[in-house]
């Protein structure tokens, strides 16, 4: 399967714990995006990378969130000191450099108890 | 006013019906437009791009109206398998897209 993959698919954690998610994009894609989606809403942009450079972060993104893409391939999203409001589906997507079309991974569903 | 607005629905239609959704956007400089489909608890999947001249793919037709700042999606001969949420996506001059909240479609026998 050469699509976007994410790991883990589900994560249950207690409030205050740190969590890290991984995304492996389609190998030829230069851009990688992270989104958060809650029930009844569309995906909300968090941040994106072009190769290894993080080009933009949403101003809504708390300092507790950090993302990396060290070698321009896979990416990680870390949430520190999780809060119940962080419970959501975290989606990763990738695209070619010159395209607006994005391809999504299956997401990581986070539940903070 | 939200940047991208969609009627959340749900739209309940019988099999074989024709159904249309609209999506309005606020930024007149918007350049690229897409429809994505999202099944329950699954990831969004690209359905089709929306070009200035319109775009048709089988039973699906997408249109862009720049003057009134909306895009539309028409589904003809609805199938049970068309039941899903349809997300409107707009790129407003950058590679960061803005998603609508989605329109829910339920096709019943």
Image (tube, rainbow, N blue to C red):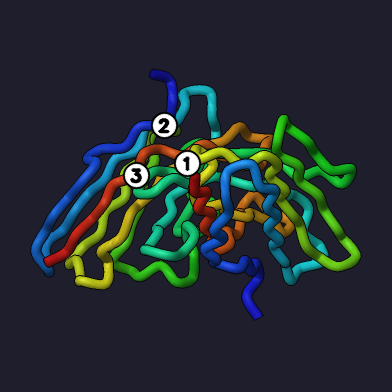
Report whether A92 appears left or right of A103.
left
Considering only order in the chain, which callout, 1 or 2, is on the residue closer to the N terminus? 2
Quadrant of the rendering where the C terminus of chain A is positioned: bottom left
Q: Which residue is mark 3?
A: A107
* Outermost residue, bottom side: B1
Where is residue A109 shown, x and y percent of the image?
26, 51
Contact flag, marks 2 and 1 (Cβ < 8 Å) = yes
Q: Residues within 10 Å of mark 2 (few under 14, many from 20)?
A: many
Q: CA distance from mark 2 to mark 3?
A: 9 Å
Residues at marks 1 and 3 on the same chain: yes
For residue A106, say whether it is visible.
yes
Which residue sits at x=52%, y=58%? B104
The secondary element bearing badge 1 is classed as strand
Q: To which residue does mark 2 refer?
A: A4
Left or right, A5 with respect to B47, comes to left
**Do callouts 2 and 3 point to residues on the same chain?**
yes
> Counting other residues with Cα less than 10 Å from the Cα at mark 1, is it few (<14), some (14-19), or many (20 or more)?
many
Q: Are marks 2 and 1 on the same chain?
A: yes
Q: Of marks 2 and 3, which one's residue comes earlier in the chain? A: 2
Q: Chain of mark 2?
A: A
- For the point 54% across and 42% down, the residue is B82
- What x and y, as percent, mark residue B57? 73, 32
Residue underneath mark 1: A93
Q: Nearer the viewer, residue A10 or A78?
A: A10
């Amino acid at each position: 399967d050469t699509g976007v993959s994410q790991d883990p698919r589900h994560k249950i954690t207690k409030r205050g714990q740190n969590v890290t998610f991984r995304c492996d994009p389609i190998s030829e894609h230069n851009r990688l995006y992270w989104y958060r989606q809650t029930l009844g809403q569309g995906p909300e942009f968090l941040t994106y990378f072009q190769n290894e450079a993080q080009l933009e972060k949403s101003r809504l993104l708390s300092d507790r969130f950090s993302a990396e893409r060290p070698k321009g391939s896979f990416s990680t999203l870390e949430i520190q000191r999780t809060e119940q409001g962080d419970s959501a589906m975290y989606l990763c997507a990738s695209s070619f450099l010159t395209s607006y079309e994005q391809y999504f991974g299956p997401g990581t569903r986070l539940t903070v108890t | 006013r939200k940047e991208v607005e969609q009627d959340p629905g749900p739209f309940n239609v019988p099999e074989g019906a024709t159904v249309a959704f609209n999506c309005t956007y606020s930024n007149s400089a918007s350049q690229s437009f897409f429809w994505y489909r999202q099944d329950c608890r699954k990831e969004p999947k690209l359905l089709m791009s929306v070009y200035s001249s319109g775009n048709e793919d089988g039973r699906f037709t997408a249109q862009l109206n720049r003057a009134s700042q909306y895009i539309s999606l028409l589904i003809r001969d609805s199938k049970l398998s068309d039941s899903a949420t349809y997300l409107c996506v707009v790129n407003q001059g950058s590679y960061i897209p803005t998603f609508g909240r989605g329109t829910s479609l339920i096709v019943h026998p």
